[in-house]
Image: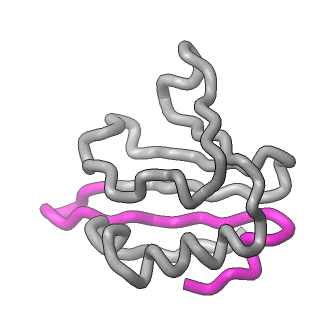
Amino acid sequence: MKKFEIPFEEKNSERFSRFLNILYSKNQLPIYIWTEFSNDCGVYRIPSILDFNSHFAFEVNADGLIQLLSENLDDELIFDFTEDNNERLLEVELSGANWIQVEY
């Protein structure tokens, strides 16, 4: 497992977009999105990590957790977003055979 933390709004940057493109180059399979609602509604499948909307609002999920899992279950990315002293932060956790190799 590999973790790094960035300001929440940095996920909208060109650098973060390049990071997602590199993840895609390592695993191009469809992605399952898990949130707090997945237990009731099921997971949501998207064609690839490039189809994930990384520009989501901080308030999108009260739990502050979004999990992305590759269709073959080889790679996982967890977004854990929090607010501390009026500073919004995003912790990104990578695991799996391919994505863990990627540096931010």
Task: Report the side of 50 relative to 31 (left or right).
Answer: left
Looking at the picture, how far across and down is residue 37, in whole percent? 48, 23
Looking at the picture, how far across and down is residue 31, in whole percent? 67, 47
Identify the residue shown where x is 57% and y is 55%: 78
Identify the residue shown where x is 74% and y is 64%: 95
Rendering quarter of residue 9? bottom left
* Residue extending farthest top: 40
Rendering quarter of residue 11? bottom left
Q: Is residue 68 above or below residue 89?
A: above
Task: Report the side of 76 relative to 104 (left or right).
Answer: right
| Count of numbered marks | 0
Q: Is residue 59 above or below residue 39?
A: below
Q: Is residue 78 above or below residue 63?
A: below
Tell me the quadrant of the picture where the C terminus can be found: bottom right
Identify the residue shown where x is 49% and y is 29%: 36
Q: Is residue 28 magenta?
A: no
Looking at the picture, how far across and down is residue 12, in whole percent? 32, 69
Tell which of 90 and 97 is nearer to you.
Answer: 97
Tell me the quadrant of the picture where the N terminus can be found: bottom right
What segment is highlighted magenta in the picture? 82-104
Looking at the picture, how far across and down is residue 4, in whole percent? 52, 76
Identify the residue shown where x is 72% and y is 74%: 25
